[in-house]
Structure formats: structure tokens, C-alpha cells
């Protein structure tokens, strides 16, 4: 999970305790921040800002994850993240 450098992420270690790797955008790296903001915007299509994450079910998270991982991206040459990762693993295993 990638965060920006805001103080609202000061408890990021708690996420790491459950086995999720956490990363922060490097200062002055606008390309990292832009991708983070874009992804946040895509998630907000499913969970508006007024949503409480306390009410989000595991099934909803899996649905959002599948939808975003199977959505073509201009930055990926109109491939989906799933297609790119499948190609990466295929290439990595063949090498």
C-alpha cells in the first residue's frame, strides 16, 4: 500500500503488522504522487469520501480490487494491471 507523506498516515505500522507492505511517495517525486492520487480517485468511484470504512465488507474490497485490476490503463498501453502482471510473471518464469 502506498501513502503520501501526510500525518494522517502516522499509524501505517499497524497496517504492516497484518502483513501488508507499506510505502511512501518520495518527496518531490510528483509522478509517484500523481499515481497515488489517481488510484485514490478510482477507489472513490466505489467508496465516496462520505463512506465509513468500518462498513466496508471483504466482498466489497475484493470487488473493487478486481474491477481496478481489470480496468485498462492508458499508462499501461491500454492493458490492464492484471494483464501486465500476468505477462511479467510469464516472462520471469520463462527466463
Image: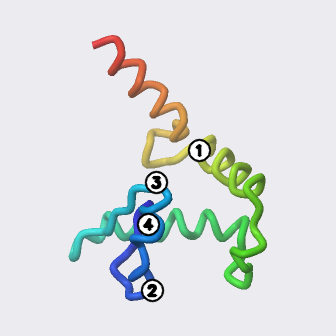
Quarter containing the C terminus: top left
State which tag comes first along the sequence, 1 or 4.
4
Q: Nearer the viewer, mark 2 or mark 1?
A: 2
Do the numbered discs 2 and 3 sit on residues whose CB atoms are within 8 Å?
no
Q: Which mark is residue 36?
A: 4
User: Where residue 66 appears, x then y in whole percent?
Assistant: 66, 45
Q: Nearer the viewer, mark 3 or mark 4?
A: 3
Q: Secondary structure at mark 4?
A: helix
Q: Secondary structure at mark 3?
A: loop
User: Where residue 1 appears, x then y in whole percent?
Assistant: 44, 60
Crowding at label 3, few (<14), some or many (≥20) Cα neighbours within 10 Å?
few
Q: Nearer the viewer, mark 2 or mark 3?
A: 3
Q: Name the residue located 62 percent from the left edge and 45 percent from the top edge.
A: 71
The residue closer to the viewer here, 44 or 9, is 9
Q: Which residue is mark 1?
A: 69
State which tag comes first along the sequence, 2 or 1.
2
The answer to whether 61 is drawn above or below residue 85 in the figure is below
With 47 as the anchor, is 77 left or right in this view?
Answer: left
Q: Name the residue located 44 percent from the left edge and 62 percent from the top edge.
A: 17
Cα separation, mark 3 vs mark 1, equals 20 Å
Q: Name the residue located 33 percent from the left edge and 21 percent from the top edge.
A: 92
Q: Which residue is mark 3?
A: 19
Cα separation, mark 3 vs mark 4, equals 21 Å
With 75 as the anchor, is 68 left or right in this view?
Answer: right
Q: Secondary structure at mark 2?
A: helix
The answer to whether 77 is drawn above or below residue 25 in the figure is above
Q: Which residue is mark 2?
A: 8
State which tag comes first along the sequence, 3 or 1.
3
Amino acid at each position: 500500500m502506498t501513502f503520501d507523506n501526510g500525518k494522517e498516515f502516522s499509524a501505517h505500522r499497524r497496517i504492516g503488522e497484518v502483513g501488508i507492505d507499506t510505502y511512501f511517495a518520495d518527496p518531490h517525486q510528483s509522478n509517484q504522487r500523481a499515481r497515488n492520487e489517481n488510484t485514490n480517485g478510482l477507489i472513490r468511484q466505489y467508496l465516496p469520501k462520505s463512506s465509513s470504512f468500518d462498513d466496508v465488507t471483504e466482498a466489497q474490497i475484493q470487488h473493487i480490487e478486481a474491477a481496478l485490476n481489470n480496468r485498462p490503463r492508458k499508462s499501461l498501453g491500454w492493458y490492464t494491471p492484471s494483464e501486465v502482471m500476468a505477462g511479467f510473471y510469464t516472462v520471469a518464469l520463462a527466463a
